[in-house]
Image (tube, rainbow, N blue to C red):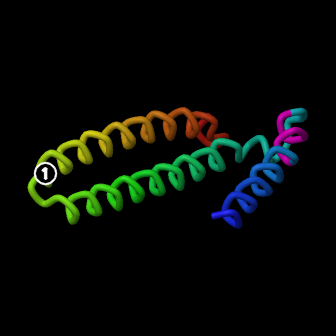
Amino acid sequence: MNRLVRMTYWGLMAVLAFATPAFAADGPLLEFSGAIGAGLVTFGAAYGIGKLASAAYDGMARQPEVAGTIQVAMIIAAALIEGFTFFALVVCLQQNPWAK
């Protein structure tokens, strides 16, 4: 886990280092900021839903008598995650330079 945290930290620092000049001037990195944001949103949602499903299946395996309740809660949480993901994708893809 410690390695994952360090890699995430340095990845975020690299993105922030490149974001400053990209937002300061009208250049090629600014044109692709929507695509980069859409990719990050997609990876984040996939990771979140994967962790959600993993925890739900683990809970169902440990307590089969409440599997129905856990499954309903998992479906509602996944729907909320996907709803937010679609909203974030729309916001990110509105920055598409070819759509203008």
Q: Position of residue 76 (x, y in %)?
A: 25, 40
Screen quadrant of the C terminus: top right
Question: In this view of the protein, which residue sits in the foreground, 16 or 48?
Answer: 48
The residue located at (63%, 64%) in the rendering is 1
8 vs 57, left or right, is: right
Q: Residue at x 60, y 50 (%)?
A: 40
What residue is disc 1 on?
Answer: 66
The magenta segment: 18-23
Direction from residue 84 to residue 21 in the image, left or right: right
Residue appearing at x 11%, y 50% in the figure: 68
State whether residue 11 is above or below residue 19.
below
Q: Residue 7: image x %, image y %? A: 73, 62
Badge count: 1
Q: Which residue is drawn at the image coordinates 51% and 36% (left, top)?
A: 88
For the residue pair 89 and 46, the one nearer the viewer reads as: 46
Give the residue type that dot 1 points to: Val
Image-based side of 61 in relation to 26, left or right: left
- In the structure shown, which secondary structural element does the residue marked by tag 1 occupy? helix
